[in-house]
Amino acid sequence: MSMDKTREISDMHKEFLLIVGDKLKNMRAAKELGYEQLAFQAGLHSATYWKMEKGEANFQIRSLLLVLDFHQKSLKDFINEL
């Protein structure tokens, strides 16, 4: 049995990605950085980070952790603040 890779995520999880993206955008804005500046400083491609903020990325946890490291925030604290 093969797995269908085109399957969409649930609306609940789409909403979660949007909430995560909004939180990332607000954290970036608080530092008065453009998304390209933050992406560079966090070690990500700017398109990857932009998609994370827009809730469009099927991003890796590693990418999120790089951004959180830049902000000096733990994953636990980030999730609790959502």
Image: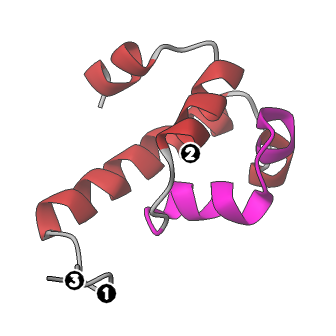
Residue 40 on image: x %, y % = 86, 44
Whole-angstrom CA distance, mark 2 to mark 3, is 37 Å
Query: Which label sits in the foreground, 2 or 1?
Result: 1
Q: Badge 1 is on which residue?
A: 6
Q: Is residue 7 left or right of residue 31?
A: left
Q: Quadrant of the C terminus?
A: top left
User: Is 8 part of what is drawn in magenta?
Assistant: no
Q: Nearer the viewer, mark 3 or mark 1?
A: 3
Q: Marks 3/1: CA distance?
A: 12 Å
| Dot 2 amino acid type | Lys
SS at badge 2: helix
Marks 2, 3: nearer the viewer: 3
In the image, which residues are magenta?
A: 39-56
Badges 2 and 1: C-beta atoms under 8 Å apart? no
At 56% from the left and 37% from the top, the residue drawn is 62
Q: Quadrant of residue 81?
A: top left
| In-front residue for pair 25/65 | 65
Q: Residue at x 82, y 53 (%)?
A: 36
- Please, what is the three-letter code of the amino acid marked with disc 3? Ser
Q: What residue is at 23 percent from the left and 79 percent from the top? A: 3
Residue type at tag 1 = Thr
Residue 31 locus on image (x, y percent): 73, 28
Number of disc labels: 3
**In the rendered structure, does residue 46 fall within the stretch colored magenta?**
yes
Work out whether mark 2 precedes mark 1 in sequence or the reverse, and give the earlier one.
Answer: 1
The residue that label 3 is drawn on is: 2
Mark 1 Cα-neighbour bin, 10 Å: few <14, some 14–19, many ≥20: few
Q: What residue is pinned by disc 2?
A: 25
Camera-nearest residue between 29 and 80: 80
Answer with left or right where residue 2 lies relative to residue 56. Answer: left
